[in-house]
């Protein structure tokens, strides 16, 4: 490595908005951050839902009506039951001898 071309890498104190602070190394020195590993939702497992101008409430109101269960469809009567109730009884089949004599 060449001498004099690399920046100074000094210990730096990082302070978070939640109050947590830790020491690391940086070229810029001490600094503050808005979110750290102690308060970030990914690491803590909590979710903070920020409602900007009521958008979340409007979304929930709009789609709350669509979450109602759909009623089961009513089955129409089967066609066989309707036909048997209104149809006439069938005639008795002809004996085989009569069919054979009539064909000659």
Image: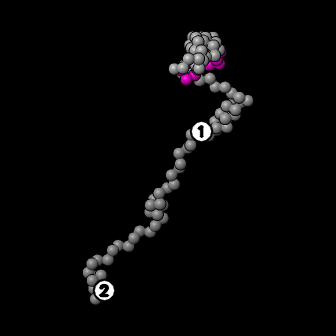
Query: In the image shown, does 54 or 52 lie closer to the viewer?
Result: 52
Q: In the shown orientation, is residue 102 left or right of residue 88?
A: left
Q: Is residue 36 among what the camera can see? A: no
Q: Percent from the top left, x then y, of residue 44? A: 54, 19
Q: In the shown orientation, is residue 24 left or right of residue 95?
A: right
Compared to residue 70, the image places residue 4 above or below, namely above
* Picture quarter with the C terminus: bottom left
Choose top left, top right, bottom left or bottom right for residue 89.
bottom left
Q: Percent from the top left, x then y, of residue 98? A: 29, 82
Q: Write down the region rendered in magenta.
A: 32-43
Q: Percent from the top left, x then y, of residue 3? A: 56, 17
The total of numbered circles placed on residues is 2
Compared to residue 1, the image places residue 94 above or below, namely below
Choose top left, top right, bottom left or bottom right for residue 13.
top right
37 in the magenta segment: yes
Query: In the image shown, does 23 or 28 lie closer to the viewer?
Result: 28
Q: Is residue 24 among what the camera can see? A: yes
Of the two numbered discs 1 and 2 on the same chain, state the one appearing first in sequence. Answer: 1
Q: Residue at x 58, y 11 (%)?
A: 11
63 in the magenta segment: no
Instruction: Please give the label number shown on residue 24.
Output: none
Colour scheme of the picture: one colour
Residue wearing tag 1: 68
Q: Residue at x 49, y 55 (%)?
A: 77
Cβ atoms under marks 1 and 2 closer than 8 Å: no
Within 10 Å of disc 2 (Cα), the crowding (few <14, some 14-19, many 20+) is few
Residue wearing tag 2: 102
């Amino acid at each position: 490595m060449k001498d004099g071309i690399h920046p100074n890498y000094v210990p730096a104190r990082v302070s978070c908005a939640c109050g947590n602070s830790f020491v690391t190394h940086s070229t810029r020195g001490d600094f503050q951050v808005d979110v750290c590993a102690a308060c970030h939702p990914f690491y803590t497992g909590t979710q903070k839902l920020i409602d900007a101008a009521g958008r979340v409430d409007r979304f929930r109101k709009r789609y709350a009506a669509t979450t109602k269960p759909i009623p089961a469809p009513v089955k129409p009567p089967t066609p066989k039951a309707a036909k048997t109730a209104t149809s006439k009884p069938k005639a008795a089949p002809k004996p085989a001898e009569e069919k054979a004599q009539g064909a000659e």
